[in-house]
Amino acid sequence: MPLFSSHVQQQAENSYTSRDFNQCVTAQYVRKGYKTFWGYDIGVYNVARNANGRTMVGNLCASVTGSSGKLHVAPCVLPKATAGPYWIVAYEEGDNGYALISGGQPKNLVTTGNDVNTCGPNGDRPLL
């Protein structure tokens, strides 16, 4: 059972998801039930598609940092020291649920990404 599944409705271009692959991006966060060698306990499964239907898949790992709603995410083979921040700024469950996710502390030039995610594939237009 996933902790959270989301469909990205709006995403800032970033170093790990190019503009070409911003057509259909989904993310699923699943509690592993154990800690990996590097101490991760959440699996992150990202799928991105481009306009031609080509798929890019990312199987990542995450762990909660000291504060609620703050995760560190990285490829599972890398230590936590290399993980990037993902902050769940706002979240609501349900069919019309959503998550606002920031790539860490906002800075003058955000290069780590900001996302507007919804629980369903078709976002609620007034929300967006």
Image (spheres, rainbow, N blue to C red):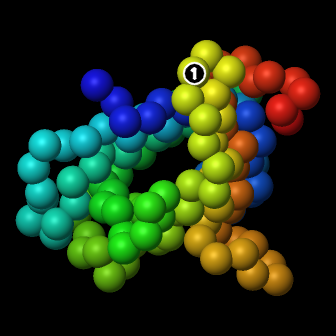
Horizontal arrangement in the rendering, residue 107 relative to residue 53 (left or right): right
Which quarter of the figure is the C terminus placed in? top right
x and y percent of residue 99 in the render?
A: 63, 42
Q: Amino acid at mark 1?
A: Gly
Near-viewer residue (68 or 37): 68
Q: Is residue 108 above or below residue 5?
A: below
x and y percent of residue 111 in the render?
A: 70, 72
Q: Which residue is mark 1?
A: 94
Near-viewer residue (106 or 54): 106
x and y percent of residue 56 in the render?
A: 50, 39
Residue 47 in view in this figure? no
Which quarter of the figure is the N terminus placed in? top left
Horizontal arrangement in the rendering, residue 19 relative to residue 61 (left or right): right
Q: Name the residue located 60 percent from the left edge and 43 percent from the top edge.
A: 91
Residue 62 in view in this figure? yes
Q: Name the residue located 61 percent from the left edge and 65 percent from the top edge.
A: 103
